Amino acid sequence: MEHTPEATLEAASRDVQVWSYPLIFAQRVRLNFVQPLDPFGPRQATSAGAPVNTFGHQRRLSDPTLTVGVAPNVDTLYSVAWLDVRHNEFELRLPDFGDRYASFQVALPDTTSPIVISRGTPGEPLPTVKIGKGMARLEADGGEVRLRTNWRYVMIVGRILVDGANKLDLAAAHQLQDALTLRSTPYGVPPEPAARDVELAGTTRQAEIEDPATFALALAQVLDDADPDAITDELCRDINRSRIQGIAGLSTASTSAIADGLAQGCDDIERHVRSFGRSANGWAINDVGTDFGDNRLLRAAVAHSQIFINPVSEALYPVCEVDAAGKPLDGEGCAYEITFAAGSLPPVQAFWSLTMYHAKGLLVDNEINRYAIGDRTPGLRFGDDGSLVIRLQHSRPPDDANWLPAPSGPFRLMLRLYRPTTTAWDPPAVVRVDAASR
């Protein structure tokens, strides 16, 4: 790149975009959940939103009406709490989930997850979780796990397995959600929502990705809420070189160069989604989970496609955007199959599912209200040899038992393996077939 002032702005803006992408996205998720403009306002049944420092409970499994975050699962009910740790200490107590799968993830705004509590032996008490401010420290002592952090916000994400079509099972899961106990001890008078939070709530995720002024606003709030140790000298140099914090006083040419740099950062992130981790049969498999280390691009790519994933010990999330020939998946006039050979279903201790998304990570509306196929899907038909063939296409095939409806456009697939028995398993390729073959 030519070393002009605009080229310097573009390169630095690209680097700031990559670093901040997961944090700004996490901030947007928080804003969508807590609704600073109307924190006590009504929420749909598929939402787990609630005011800050309060659990919100999803009462109905995710469907296409849910647009908070990206790539929601349709296997578990979410219970979510965004906690202001800078002004409160918290204690979380969990009920006995019996033999029902349930996990609780404590996630930080940099999208790491220092704590995941998952039901082990039925009847065995789950530990109490205590969260407060201080130098980063994680301790476990018998029946208690304690986290200290200098990030302002911490998110707790509960996932409780449920059969959404079974009213009794749904009611039992609701009772477990209601039995969650979250106690807080304020350090002082609770603060009002940050003015920038309120302003950002009136903007969109797309604006903070591509509009320099909105990006600068979102970045400023991220920096205010961040653990000071996360603001490295290298990052400060990038921010200063990008001049993003003085965006209001820049020329049109400079602002355009910053916008180009932000766009370049997004392009780099989206390309990396197809290749992060290891590649197998067209699938990108992140087998390091949330252990990103200093790899900014990996952290951003994972946030883009599957923000707030679990560590690999709890779940694996292979993502596929291309078919066996390397061509992008597209439901417009195309049909596909994925074949799990006999004895080669995803290796899990808990459960697995294959979910269909639009290219941007939202669920696909369809006539049979099926958004995923997994080991609990009723009526699946296996071949005489024990294989399972899943059909992926937009139009309804004559035999729809194994049909996972696709949009009439680009799409993305995500496999979920909860409590995987290995990270070495490779999903089979997605093969394009004749749309009229079945």
Image (cartoon, helix red, strand yellow):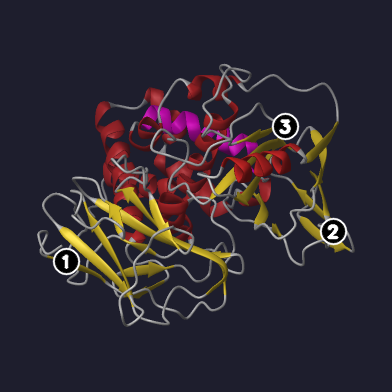
Residue 38, quarter of picture: top right
The CA distance from mark 2 to mark 3 is 24 Å
Residue 193, quarter of picture: top right
Amino acid type, mark 3:
Asn
Q: Which mark is residue 125?
A: 2
Label 3 crowd bin: few (<14), some (14–19), many (20+), radius 10 Å? many
Q: Secondary structure at mark 2?
A: loop
- Give the foreground label among 2 and 3: 2
N-terminal of the pair, mark 2 or mark 3, is 3
The CA distance from mark 1 to mark 3 is 47 Å
Would residue 80 appear left or right of 436 to someone viewing this image?
right
Q: How many marks?
A: 3
* Residue at numbered disc 1: 432
Query: Would residue 221 be counted in the magenta stretch?
Result: yes
Marks 1/3 in contact by CB < 8 Å: the verdict is no
Q: Secondary structure at mark 3?
A: loop
N-terminal of the pair, mark 2 or mark 1, is 2
Closer-to-camera residue (352/169): 169
Label 2 crowd bin: few (<14), some (14–19), many (20+), radius 10 Å? some
Closer-to-camera residue (338/112): 338
Amino acid type, mark 1:
Arg
Residue 284 place in picture, x, y as percent: 37, 67
The C terminus is located in which quarter? bottom left
Residue 427, quarter of picture: bottom left
Please report the bounds of the magenta region as a residue range: 212-226
Would residue 21 appear left or right of 151 to someone viewing this image?
left
